[in-house]
Image: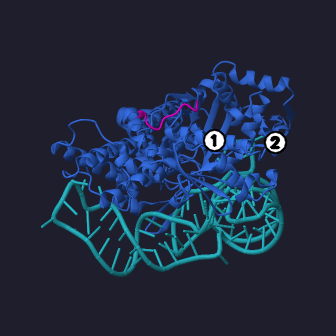
Amino acid sequence: MSILAKTEQLLKDQIAEAILAANLAEQEQLPEIMLEKPKDKNHGDFATNIAMQLARIAKKAPRQIAEDIVEQIDRTKASIEKIEIAGPGFINFFMKSDFLGALIPVILEAEDAYGQSQIGNGQKVQVEFVSANPTGSLHLGHARGAAYGDVLCNVLEATGHQVEREYYINDAGSQIDNLALSIEARYLEILDLPANMPEDGYFGQDIINIASSIFKEDGDKWAQEEQTKRLAYFKEYGLTYLIKQIEQDLRDFRVEFDNWFSERSLHEGDQIPNVLSLLEEDNYTYEKDGATWFRSTEFGDDKDRVLIKKDGSYTYLTPDITYHQNKFQRGFDKVINVWGADHHGYIPRMRAAILALGYPDEKFTVQTIQMVSLLEQGEAVKMSKRSGNVVTLRELIEDVGVDAVRYYFVMRSNDSHLDFDIDLARKQSTDNPVFYVQYAHARICTMLKQAEKQGFMTDDQYDAKLLVTEKEVDLLTKLGEFPQVLEDAAKKYTVHQVTQYVFDLAALLHSFYNAEKVLDANNIELTKARIALMKAVKITIANGLKIIGVSAPEKM
RNA sequence: GUCCCGGUAGCUCAGCUGGAUAGAGCAACAGACUUCUAAUCUGUAGGUCGCAGGUUCGAAUCCUGCUCGGGACGCCA
């Protein structure tokens, strides 16, 4: 438990005891005691609104209740400096100054591990993300999903979950046949033969590259072959090529999957028929119009869904249900899917299937990522697969760099649409907040080097009680929040809180830096304390940046 | 028509398990480099928190209705 959490718990216990001692409520009436960190420093280090909450139960005015509580609190136990009652009945706690200083040794000791917690209890969590069809390059939208998913995994790992990252490869459906046809068309074009690009084919540059790669290897050999053989070869060739490329793009984006799960593997053996008969046994399927349907409406979906088409083939849903059964059979305590918002309509039927198979739906969650729109010179750029006019992840990385792209994509809530201003990103300028945070880290590194040079680092002794200026206290307070931020982000899957936090911390550092001089030969004791503080800030910024997958440079 | 997401400063967005005077970046304006890095800082200005009801001691936050914007509603994947 972090220092802050311990202090909070101690205070809460004290308040609860005080309420009982003052006969304001019975044990079983006691509402949950909420402690908050007031925005305004004049309101203390912690505040509670318990007196207002108790107004009904105790049938007294909130301010009177607050006074009764305060009277009963033992200030010595929780190192309370003073307690004030304010406004309609808030109780504000001011802590002794050494309570924050105690953070520094904790952070210096924990180092890389500062911020981590065990709230996950070693739960096995699987996060499936990106899972883009292997029919082209990863683009902007995939990049957001990749950044979000990966950072979510980092957050979960930091909070004591055992995480597995998985990519589901849709290598079995009709889109793959389309891929083969698209490659074929491009291949025949190279040979100046009549070519038919399918209406819903893939028009991207990578398909042209694949065709010319085949041509380089085999010349016009495949034009002579009969079409089924040619397509079969092109399909495999294209898949291998594209999956390899996707894997490489993601690796360059610092995203490594533990498992690449092939949809095709589900079609081997009897896995899909077994799932179908499971559903049939429980009477969750029926025949209609020559197709087999799933009664998903029994589980809240707005219409039933086809599992086996009239022509005998499966819909996309059927292997996907099998896939999710497979996930649960692998024993995960929690299965998290990260999907683009355009797939949200698919969630109820997947949830229905999971319930039908008898798995608890609390173990299943889908996080949706809102769309990314591209701005160029202030104008929205229409992206279409048809025209091949898409900005790829690779281009983005080459233009802007991994740090900036990752930072940008986890800076905002996944629920918000994101305008990606390509000009701004390309500028690589000071406007980009990622530099602001990195700069804070680099600045501290320079300071520490100077400190060493000037002989301040002779021993590790320091007195944190000397850190009393406003800026110092702000920094300390912020440092203490880090574990809580990660816990929150893990509980609510709100990854952007980490980015927000790291930015705020950097802002406080810059402000402190401009206000106070750290290295001061005339005040060795204060200098030592401030060096310790700087080390703690450096560690915390680095840990935060590591979670969002951004580098923490020593100098810039 | 149904469902999902959003509407907060000129722009891009935080804040949303209800709390005290609603925040940040950018843009604007005025200042700070002989100094541990000015990729920084300090200050000023900028708001009917989409609209209307409701719940509450208290609503940007919860509930209902409306409205605007984006997306989804296939025997496609």
Question: Hey, which quadrant is residue A304 in on the image?
Answer: top right
Comes first in the chain, label 2 or label 1: 1
Q: Position of residue A221 (x, y in %)?
A: 42, 32
Q: Nearer the viewer, residue A535 or B8?
A: A535
Q: Residue at x 85, y 38 (%)?
A: A298
> Drawn colour of chain A?
blue
Q: Residue at x 64, y 39 (%)?
A: A13
State the residue position of label 1: A14
State the residue position of label 2: A300
| Up/down of A508 relative to A277, above or below | below
Q: Is residue A204 visible?
A: no
What segment is highlighted magenta in the picture? Answer: A112-120
Q: Residue at x 68, y 45 (%)?
A: A33
Chain bearing mark 2: A
Q: Secondary structure at mark 2?
A: loop
Provide the letter of the chain coloured cyan. B
Q: Nearer the viewer, residue A364 or A466?
A: A466
Q: CA distance from mark 2 to mark 1?
A: 46 Å
Q: Main secondary structure of the magenta part?
A: loop
| Up/down of A553 relative to A224, above or below | below
Which of the two marks, 2 or 1, is nearer to us in this view? 1
